[in-house]
Image (cartoon, rainbow, N blue to C red):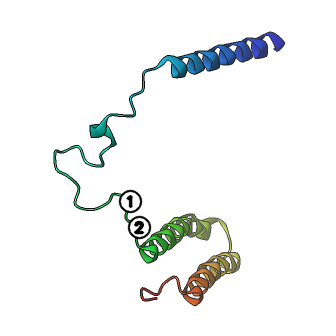
Amino acid sequence: MKIIALLMLLISLIILILITILNLISKKSFSDREKNSPFECGFDPKSSPRTPFSLQFFLIAVIFLIFDVEITLLFPIILLIKITNMINFIIVFSFFTLILLLGIYHEWNQGALNWSL
């Protein structure tokens, strides 16, 4: 076992050394104007590519992702109906739904769901 671990360590060191050497000798051209431009279609950009995005849209997108993932966690709870009694199912489902509702209330209370500032 020690020989296998030593062999794996040696192989990983060799790969790390090769990657380092290849990074040092590879030719990188950072001064290419066409590659540094935000669009390579032949048109000059009309605005800066670094314009700030809407913070409200970002917050709504994050909230959607969080609750979307949690909604997918509700599907296995439906399968619990077959293997648990109804009282345990109602307790688990109510607790999970309460956590989701408290999360929505918290976001609403913090003003993340308001579009106007």
Can you tell which quarter of the image residue 81 is in?
bottom right
Q: Which residue lies furthest to the left in this view?
A: 42
Q: Alpha-carbon neighbours of circle 2 within 10 Å: few (<14), some, or many (≥20)? A: few
**Helix, strand or loop status at disc 2:** loop
**Helix, strand or loop status at disc 1:** loop
Q: CB atoms at circles 1 and 2 under 8 Å apart? A: yes
Can you tell which quarter of the image residue 29 is in?
top left
Q: Which residue lies furthest to the right in this view?
A: 2
Q: In this view, does 6 lie above or below 23?
A: above
> Going by the image, does 102 lie left or right of 24?
right
Residue at image mark 1: 50
Q: Report how far apart the C-alphas of labels 1 and 2 lie in the structure.
A: 6 Å
What residue is at 63 percent from the left and 20 percent from the top?
A: 16
Q: In this view, does 97 lie above or below 27?
A: below
Kindly identify which numbered label has been placed on residue 52: 2
**Nearer to the camera, 89 or 108:** 108
In x, y percent, where is residue 40? Answer: 23, 43
What residue is at 57 percent from the left and 16 percent from the top?
A: 21
Quadrant in which the N terminus appears: top right
Q: Is residue 65 above or below residue 30?
A: below
Q: How many labels does the image show?
A: 2
In x, y percent, where is residue 85? Answer: 68, 74
